[in-house]
Image (spheres, coloured by chain):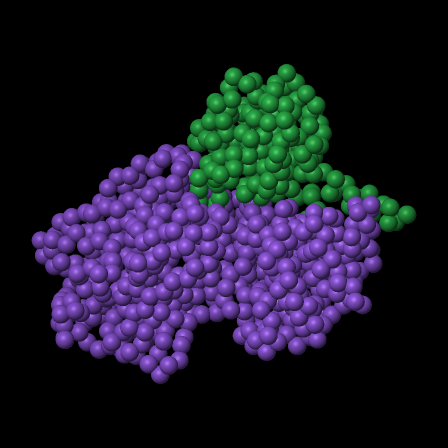
Chain colours: A purple, B green
Amino acid sequence: MTDLRHCLLRAAALCCVSGSSFALSPGDVVDDFRLNDQNGLSHELYYLSDMKAVVLLAAGNGCAASRTAAKAVDALRTRYQAQGVEFLAIDSNLKDTPETIAKETKADGTGLPVLTDELQLIGESLGFAHNGEVLIVNPQNWKVIYQGAAEKGGNHYVAAALDATLAGAPVKVSHTDAAGCDIVMPERERRSAHAQISYEKTIAPMLSAHCVACHREGGIAPWQMSNYDMVRGFSPMIREVVRTKRMPPWHADPHYGVFSNDRSLTADETKTLVHWIEAGSPRGGGADPLTAVKKDWPVWALGPPDLVVNLPKFDVPATGVIPYQMWTVDNPLDHDVWVRAVDFLPGARSNLHHIIATIGGEMAPGDKRDNTDGSLADYVPGSEPLQIPPESGILLKKGAKFGFQAHYTVNGKPVSDVTQMGLYFMDKPPQYRYRAAIMANPRIKIPANTKAYTNDAVYKFDREVLVYSLHPHAHFRGAAAEFVAQYPDGHEEVLLNVPRYEFNWQTTYVLKAPIVLPAGTAVKYSMTYDNSTQNKANPDPNRVVPWGQQTWDEMLFGVIRFRYLTLDANPTRTAQTSP
Amino acid sequence: MLLMVLCAAVGAASAGELRPGGHVADFTLKDQTGAAHQLYALAGKKAVVIMTQSDGCPIVRLAVPALREIRERYRSQDIEFLLLNPTLQDTPDAVQRETEEFGFGMTVLLDRTQQVGEAWGVDRTADVFVIDPRTWTLLYHGPIDDRLNYESQRPVHHPYLTDALDALLANKPVAVASVVSPGCLINFPHRKHSYQ
């Protein structure tokens, strides 16, 4: 009976609605997605696998039907959240921004997170047509169990569906007609045009530019974008990793800051790629540019280094969780030098996931050394060499030791790695020292079985500085990070928001235009940890997690690279001892 | 009448999914070396365990050693362990290279026309199908356990596959018969997707 009804619904959708329009029907699977809400917090649908039901509401600013539905759904939220039901609104309206949404929800007094679907990719695939309509999803199989109005004519359809689901009974009314303000989705009307997107001229060049640095023979990505057939075969997977923001591996919220090492696709590229896949990944005519991808790897992009440092050999096993490797390596030089650039040449690109290099080991709070020294450079797959701005440099003193933290991933076969670090020196001392401000809390204790625990540390700049980059750092339980500047005049500015922190990608976010922070500015660095079973990387949610160097322990640790704006009187002296 | 025709077409698209308790039809497929294998020729086995595979999927590469270890542990029980590659892009040569490079040590059935994959409603790789050859019914469908995810591993809390095998060997019902696999999505171009 239910099948017949689905069938009739689908048939009605197929024959009675205009050709380009469609709606998800009860029984259809909802694909995974990740979106930020109006407050910059990240939400992933499939993270909610421990819920009994997920209620999704199509919402839009300035729409009476949406406001009425939002209030009804918010009231249900108060009633059902404790019973394991999650409620999320999704705003797919092009005119709405996180700022205007936050304003409206604040004015309405609703506590519902409103996810901003600025690319409309999620709203399109959910078949949202009107603000105010509701989808209920069963997290056991991600199938739709109800689609339609929140309530109508005194009938509380959503509440009835939730009561039935919580009681383990079938949902009696699984579809109603929802009215409300139309959601304008220009691309949904252009589905036939998406089949004309050129693989040769548009898709392959986009993949070459953004993906092939890793998705190539010997790269760290597990499969190679070596031709059309491979791309077509992995198309549904590409769509999933793009929709869930796993790839490309760039985790900054695009609403704050512009970064020179931004690895993400632009909004237009993302839409084009997903629409091409949804059109069936058509090959079209022309050559296959991906077959011409070069086979060699760059060797020392800046030319031969002045000093090459060999890191210890490491044998990577086929599988398992590998602890971070911590190494100390002697500096062979018998004189002080100033470093202007640092590069890495990995031995096993397929397994080396990151290196954090320091002079004298990783800085920790309470360290006797000046805490603006110590950081050197990081390696992540596909990264460019560190080139310190021309008037600045890092002092490498004779007799100092290099410290390395190396992170390897397993890929199913054993591999040996010897990585090299190349250093490039300056001819004469620079005007400024390239410094690092460390924000850390070694007394951190993350409670057990907690989905979101936030801790922060503050660094106050007592002189005017020019900030170059920001680096959040945590381990398996890191979930979200933020750097907020608190200016002397009292106003605050988000310098970097990382709504979904991913410990595998230890990214340094390099500001495209360095920013000036006036003397007296405090930067608050915060990290939110997920110590629950829903965090798939969490080795033990029952543990209260302390500070520690290893990935099963945690760190609240952020780094800001900067220089003082005024000339250093004597840059070879450390900040602590200079006036 | 038009509605009936549409219903038949739509029904066919969703009826393909093989669920626990469902019947597994016979098939014959070649493996990566060209040798043919018929499912129902395994009628004398106590169980047939088939895991979906595609070249280049990190979850598969890390799951195969665990599957091999389980095969070893149940060696005396006469259970057949096979891999099934229902992709369009992986040629026999490519699959052979993958099995050698990663030391799979297992037979990979090549479903090059996606016939079995379509019939079973396969969605992802590293998805294990446990079949009871006495009745050719599906007993379990899901990952080996809850260890793997993309770029992360954690200790096993739910050994789904061995739980299912132990239940079968003890003639008991399988308690957890269906779990969503974290494996890689496989492209079935002829399948209708909800977004189309």
- Residue A164 in percent (x, y) is at 72, 52
Indicate the quadrant containing the C terminus of chain A: top left, top right, bottom left or bottom right.
bottom left
Which residue sits at x=59%, y=58%? A82
Give the vertical position of A458 relative to B57 (above or below): below
Give the vertical position of A129 relative to B185 (above or below): below
Indicate the quadrant containing the N terminus of chain A: top left, top right, bottom left or bottom right.
top right
Occupied quadrant, residue A461? bottom left
Q: Is residue A333 left or right of residue A404?
A: left
Occupied quadrant, residue A489? bottom left
Q: Is residue B161 left or right of residue A390?
A: right
User: Exactly how many numbered labels are in the figure?
Assistant: 0
Which residue sits at x=24%, y=77%? A463
Q: Is residue A487 visible?
A: yes
Residue closest to the far right:
B1
- Residue A270 in percent (x, y) is at 55, 59
- Residue B52 in percent (x, y) is at 57, 34
Q: Is residue A322 left or right of residue A342?
A: right
Occupied quadrant, residue A458? bottom left
The residue lying toward the viewer, choosing from A421 and A2, is: A2
Which residue sits at x=38%, y=67%? A483
Which residue sits at x=14%, y=54%? A400
- Residue A116 in percent (x, y) is at 57, 66
Q: Is residue B180 left or right of residue A546?
A: right
Q: Is residue A129 visible?
A: no
Residue closest to the far bottom:
A489
